[in-house]
Image (cartoon, helix red, strand yellow):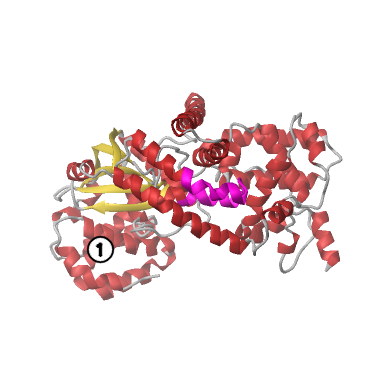
Amino acid sequence: MFSTKPFNNLPTTLEQSSPQPLLDFCSGLAIDFNANPADAQDLIKKIIRKAGDQSAAIFYVLAEIVDDDSAARRLSTLAKLNSKKLPDWIYDLREAKVSDTAFEASTFSGDTHHLLAELDIPHAPPVTMSLAADMHNGACVKDFVLLPNNLAAVKKDMQEDDTYEEIKPLALQDLATGLHNTLRIEDMQAYPEPSGQWPRTRPLLHWILGLLPEPKTYDTATPEEIAAAYEEEDKEFARREHLAEKLLKEFREEFNLNAEDTYRMESVLYAATNYGTCDPLRWSATRVQRILYRMFNNMSLDDEQMRGVPAVLKKFIAWVGKKHGTPDRIITAAVESVDGEFEELRIYFAKISAEVTYEEQFAYSRRPLDIRPLLLGEVDAQPLPLKEPMDYGHIPYNVQTTATHCLAVIENFFADHPDEDPELRVVARRLLSYTAQRKPSFLLDKRSSPERQAGTLIAVAKDINGYHRHYAEIAKALGLRSPLDRKVRSFSSFLGSDLDYLFDNAHGLLTSTTRAGVIDAR
């Protein structure tokens, strides 16, 4: 929605020698042009009414950063009608380029990862673009800003700040790839949240991407490059698992942990290497909250075991922080957050369970997931589309190969079992697509084979459609040596808690036979 409030500061913005204030100002306006290109003429009139003879400067900048070509041409034409002298850099904005020097920076806490580069605009002081990626949410955008300083000054400030662990150079194509991937992950977020100046500065990020070399993407990579990328991801996962095992062994020996505390730390490190930043070395208050939430939500430990987690976790964070060279203030902040986060989450989950005992919760979790009550409004009994293609467009790049293997197992299972309702195959495929986007750790868990992953999805597809006592038959058909029950319970718990998704998609996860039964019951 068009806002007039920023125009109150426009005179001051135009007086600045740095391009950064005007670029920021215009980025907020470009949001409206990009959202409503058909309303460009009305937006232009509003700008003229509010900015008067200062409109030309705005039009010059908007012509470069809006997405719609037609709107850009119209803005460029209007800008050139201006007779008032503007700062030289505004006329030369289309000659802007990203300097050859860029770098990335990691933090001791592991919360964010930064990409930075200098933007050179003729006749203007340099500005620095800075993207912060939120490593707790798959490396989506946490913030994107322009800084009114050159890159050398920004880098010097970061080197003097003990928040940052490592700062290293970055080639421009790698910068473009990093920005592209972060933006792609941001667009996959089910509930993106504004943070800092984001998403108001999104048009600037799009513009700067256009000044960079083409990023490396799945579509442009060679088969050899794709294979090498997957191999590197496998090595990285194995490295993390090995590191977690090594840390647990050293920690247990140094503190002479008993069996109970060792088991607690195994659960902590499993969550730490499979969720969020997937890093057992780096800890912060945010990291503590995310890991404890996972443990409470997944009921990986019973009540008595959970009560002992804070004491051993605080010891571990202090120990591993010293071992890793993390600054004392960051270690202290993480350690001091444990008790408060634990108590807050304990109360939160106690309210959710409505004073139900752990044993009752566990017994309830053994019941098959039933989503039929979520079918609201009119319900039809039309068959699900049997020839629906698998949509890989919204599946993260690093999950696509594993998802393909899992899909092949699902396809083979239903080909070998023609008596099964063919719509269950559609449901299982849709659950696979959901999992790849919402719970990729399920597919990236190296301890679980594609057969076990596919078996879990097939079992849940049958559960939610009212089929019972089928886990053993599925496990046998897929050659699994151990039961599916625990994996199915864990996945069902995750799916069942995602009510926003289920309210929107319950119809598409139920076969026509199941929906016909719901209609009859009404």
Nearest the viewer among 179 and 370 is 370
Residue drawn at x 50%, y 58% is 343
Q: Which residue is under mark 1?
A: 58
Q: Position of residue 196 (x, y in %)?
A: 34, 58
Q: Position of residue 411 (x, y in %)?
A: 73, 36
Q: Say if the magenta span includes residue 293.
A: yes
Residue drawn at x 38%, y 58% is 195
Give the mark count: 1
Quadrant housing the C terminus:
bottom right
Find residue 478 and report its image quarter.
top right
Q: Going by the image, does 151 lie left or right of 479?
A: left
Q: Say if the magenta span includes residue 513.
A: no
Q: Is residue 138 in view from this perspective?
A: no
Q: Is residue 165 above or below residue 336?
A: above
Residue drawn at x 32%, y 39% is 326
Find residue 217 and report its image quarter.
top left
> SS class of the residue under badge 1?
helix
Residue drawn at x 61%, y 51% is 303
Q: Position of residue 96 (x, y in %)?
A: 23, 46
Q: Amino acid at mark 1?
A: Ile
Q: Going by the image, does 148 lie left or right of 108?
A: left
Badge 1 crowding class, 10 Å Cα cut-off, few under 14, some 14 to 19, many 20 or more, is: many
Q: Position of residue 300 (x, y in %)?
A: 61, 45
State which region is magenta.
289-312
